[in-house]
Amino acid sequence: MDIQKNLINFKRLPTHIAFIMDGNGRWAQKYNKTRAQGHEAGSKTLENLTKEMDRIGIQYVTAYAFSTENWNRPKAEVDFLMGLLRKYFKQHIRQAKKDNIKIKVIGDCSGLALDIQEQIKELENMTKDKTGLVLQLALNYGARDEMIRSIQKIGKDLLENKIKITEIDELMFEQYLDTATIPDPDLLIRTSGEIRLSNFLLWQMAYTELYFCEEFWPDFSIQNLYDAIYHFQQRKRRFGGL
Ligand code: IPE
Ligand code: IPE
Ligand code: MG
């Protein structure tokens, strides 16, 4: 269903949208292309959507680009995805002066190649004072891994007497997650017809509105984004209350 733009309340947009960008491979199969071409097309989709979301004033976007489980794919595909990341970061480093987007990476960066880690540091540093959309890229990200890493950091601070056991509460725990300081997603969009979370933001999505659609990620258009936002705006969020 194509929702007319005028049905959307631009004053009540979700503050934070999370994306599980799924279906690059099946998109490629459908159009007789290679999986690599699917991922390349998928990266363009993220570019286009980021620009549009920044334009309309969405404040935070988190995009799942590579999971802790995606290392289980054939080496050739993993290598291609890492190459695509290098290209993505290189381009963003080049255009960082012009853009107003702030880029952050969540996930275990220590598991990525050193040159990619360097690119991430450079780009995060170059964009840290930007005032536009905050784009969190989830790379080598798994929610369980994130929580375990947080618990390790908490354990370390306990041993060093920086915190007390009785001080550990939800608010404190959140400050140890990769997403510290970023509000929880209001809306999750997963493309390609899969209806699961695949280890994405399990803590942060306790009260997120979930939206699943059939389009493969490279085909997910700005119109599809507006459809999702429209559906989000029809939901009644209760957060356990009445
Ligand atoms: C999403 O597309 C991109 C990544 C997980 C890196 P897929 O590669 O999972 O595409 P399908 O699910 O095989 O179609
Ligand atoms: C989730 O997609 C991870 C990313 C989009 C990066 P997958 O394609 O890896 O998820 P599953 O395997 O279908 O659950
Ligand atoms: Mg997939």
Image (spheres, grey):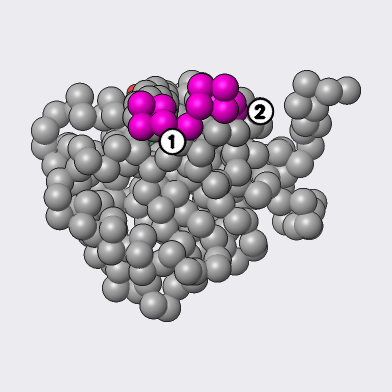
> What is the number of callouts on the image?
2
Residue at the spot x=68%, y=47% of the render? 14
Secondary structure category for the residue under label 1: loop
Indicate yes or no whether the magenta region holds residue 6: no
Residue found at x 19% / y 46%: 82
Find the residue positioned furthest to the right: 242
* Magenta segment: 158-170
Q: Is residue 160 above or below residue 59?
A: above
Q: Amino acid at mark 1?
A: Lys
Query: Rounded to the nearest whole Å, what is the CA distance between mark 1 and mark 2?
Result: 31 Å
Q: Is residue 54 left or right of residue 15?
A: left
Point out which mark residue 162 bears. 1
Q: Quadrant of residue 90?
A: bottom left
Residue 77: tell me if it is visible.
yes
Q: Position of residue 193 (x, y in %)?
A: 49, 27
Instruction: From the top left corner, tell me how far across and down residue 94 is, in percent.
Output: 29, 73
Q: Earlier in the sequence, mark 1 or mark 2?
A: 1
Q: Given contact means CB atoms under 8 Å apart, are the residues at marks 1 and 2 in contact? A: no
Tell me the mark number nearer the camera, choosing from 1 and 2: 1
